[in-house]
Image (cartoon, grey):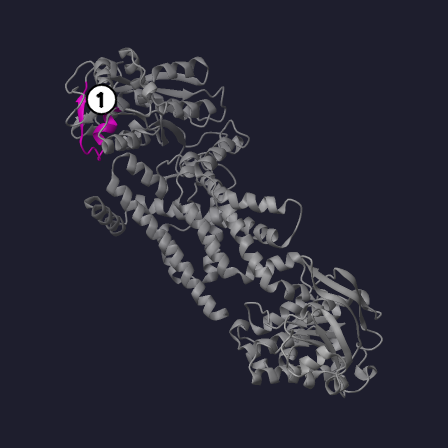
Amino acid sequence: MNELAQAFKMALALILTGDSDLLEIVWLTMQVSISAVAVASLAALPLGGALALFSFPGRRTLIILLNSLMGLPPVVVGLLVYLLLSRQGPLGEWGLLFTPTAMVIAQCILVFPIVAALTRQVVEDLWGEYGEQLRSLGASRLRSVATLLLEGRFALSTVVLAGFGRAIAEVGAVLIVGGNIAHLTRVMTTAIALETSRGELSLALGLGILLIGLSVSVNGAAYLLREYSGWRHG
Amino acid sequence: MKLPKTIPGRCEQGTFLAGIPRAGALRAGTLRAGALRAAVLLAAIVLAAFPAHSQAGDAPDGPAILLASTTSTENSGLFAHILPRFREDSGILVRVIALGTGQAIRLGMRGDADVLLVHHRPSEDRFMAEGHGAERRDVMYNDFVIAGPRHDPAGIRGMKDAAVALLKVARAGAEFVSRGDDSGTHKAELRLWEEGGLDPVKSSGKWYRETGSGMGATLNTAAAMGAYLLADRGTWLSFKNRKDLDLLVEGDPRMFNPYGVLVVNPARHPHVKSVEARVFMEWITGPRGREAISSFRLEGRQVFYPAAK
Amino acid sequence: MAELGLTNRKGQGPVDPDAPPAKAGQETGPGGILPLELDAVSYEVEGRRLVDGISLRLNPGRRTVLLGHNGAGKSITLRLCHGLLKPTSGEVRWLGPLGRNAREHQAMVFQRPVLLRRSALANITYALGLKGIPAAKRTGLAMEALGRVGLESLARTPARVLSGGEQQRLALARAWALDPEVLFLDEPTASLDPAAARKVEETIQGFHQAGMTIVLTTHDMAEARRLADDVYFIHQGKLWEQSGAAGFFRNPRTREARAFLSGELPL
């Protein structure tokens, strides 16, 4: 109990002092996860939408696969990206291992199936409501995907936030491909892991509280934005 | 000892953070930002994350090398003590990845690090023999200690023979937590068991618990279970969550823990920064480095000792 | 092509609802996609026959009402006509000279209007865009269509915050903007209160007077009386009667139609 109180005190102190190392870590954490989610969503939203509207052989298998990949173990993804980016790996030339870009790639892979699978569900549900009207208006399937992605923007913002939550909270992948290098690839989760291994449990938990706070702020901001535009667009 | 700030043929570009607003600017921005500005910011972040080339290259203001080392050195705070001095002397930034010795050596074999600082001589010798390293030198040593619950059910407190102490732990059936991660510490522990003539792995899952984790995680486990373990002194001293654990056995010469520095062979891996890596090796084994290592203190105690010249 | 049709239609002036089809205007005359012929059309879902061998012919300029109980199969028949559903057997044929491009010359309004989360105006310009109308002309056409249903003042309002009746009129305006030869309406007033329903009916009448062929489904006899030139009575997936509205209401020939008209519950 005492340790918990200590952790809250620590979290508060961290915020109040505005420690520059901490700011750097928070900034990198946001940068990596937002980049990963943005890149993954750029591909996963259209793909999920297309998967909802187009029928082709193997579609069902692909959907099942995507749904299962939502639970991809971060460590496995980390290992996979590590082997790809290692100097001995196929993409070793790029020299990306132990860089923020490597972390973005790993998180991208983790987030992609989540956004794609949930988008598929959202768009498929919307298609049930809009499908006849869009077909009546002569919209092509491709055009319908674009229209429904726009129509589903509120639900899809939640989908993207789910992806963001996954990205910002995971440690297994970024630890392996980022290496938790101070001032280069140290993010909130790897910093928490490090402080835990140093037995600084209160500090680790304090960082954890900050991470949760960060997540709450992002989700809160998204929620308010959504409320606002929902009020404007019905 | 000063090096030219850039090495010919190496790409020079900003780091990840260059060219984008600093944290403060971002905060102020988002408060005022409309949706459009948020989108622009998002685009900037995305673009910044994907510069044309590697960011593992150099620091914004000079060359950087990647040092694969052990959790024992990183967690104790040694690097935070000595690396800024090295940078001051050489202008080279050292980035540290803290792993087990086994993992660190494998990183070196794959060419994913420029220089290694590890502590398992047989593995280091094999690394050199197989041609992965360009040069190896002794750097420093510290020692391992055996820690365990304060009430010491196996009764090993104050023993001088570490191998016999471990045997007593086994006979008492007291819980013992092992790194189990192929690290230098893990290998040192296994050697002690071997000298006592007992194979604890046969009892794995019973009184012998292999965490497969770093020193810190293993210490956390032992502290929570009230179990015995072998730890390096540096991590032990810097560890804050000891709970009921006490230092019970120390000073056995077999618990001597020497560290070596190895420069990854540029003939094997042309991209490694062997010039700067050598500068680091020279420095840490030279007078400035030896002085820096000696002056590092934990709880008022010297933890690492420079290797004999 | 589309705006040409619109001008033609505007130039025509009111058309007598009981007049023969030929007077209804050029695009609904021999030059269009009509007549539409259904030849022994059936539609099955999982072995259940929801539409059973319906044959009928829809002529230009008429207001045709598909009448029947809920679940009788009239909405499915309407969708088969519009091409949203493919018949399990039988054939749907557009017999006019433009019949090959029938999709471009028809529109449909659903019981619950399906509107996009954007302004009323944007809902119409979106549909015009799908039809290939150049961007520069869309707003003008859309405003004209909104004017047609009395919604100009709400052009910038988000479509989803309009009232039910306004939403249905917006759906009608969108259909109007597309300048269809035939407009299909599936129970267009069933979800509306009487006042809103009246306005929607008036709008439909106006469309017809401007030369549009109207095909609508309803289970509301009063509405059918007000709107129908021709009545097709559908019961349990089969077509039981087809006749002029006056004749049907005065003297239904089948027992099922008589039961329906006298308000009996379906068997």
Q: Quadrant of residue C20?
A: bottom right
Q: Amino acid at mark 1?
A: Val
Between residue C100 and residue A43, name the one nearer to us. Answer: C100
Q: Position of residue C94 (x, y in %)?
A: 81, 68
Q: Is residue A95 magenta?
A: no
Q: How many marks?
A: 1
Q: Position of residue B195 (x, y in %)?
A: 28, 11
Height in image: C167 above or below A7? below
Between residue C199 and residue C235, name the one nearer to us. Answer: C235
Between residue A102 and residue B211, name the one nearer to us. Answer: B211
Height in image: B102 above or below C205? above
**Res A25 visible:** yes
Q: Which residue is mark 1?
A: B145
Secondary structure at numbered mark 1:
strand
**Res C179 visible:** no
Q: Position of residue B94 (x, y in %)?
A: 36, 31
Q: What subunit carries mark 1? A: B
Disc 1 crowd, CA 10 A, few/some/many (<14, 14-19, 20+): many
- Residue B238 placement, left or right of A47: left
> At x 56% / y 49%, what residue is drawn?
A43
Height in image: A193 above or below A216? above
- Residue B5 placement, left or right of B173: right
Q: Which region shows up in magenta?
A: B230-250
Q: Position of residue B68 (x, y in %)?
A: 38, 27
Q: Is residue B241 magenta?
A: yes
Q: Quadrant of residue B140?
A: top left
> At x 64% / y 82%, what residue is drawn?
C263
Height in image: B51 above or below B57? below
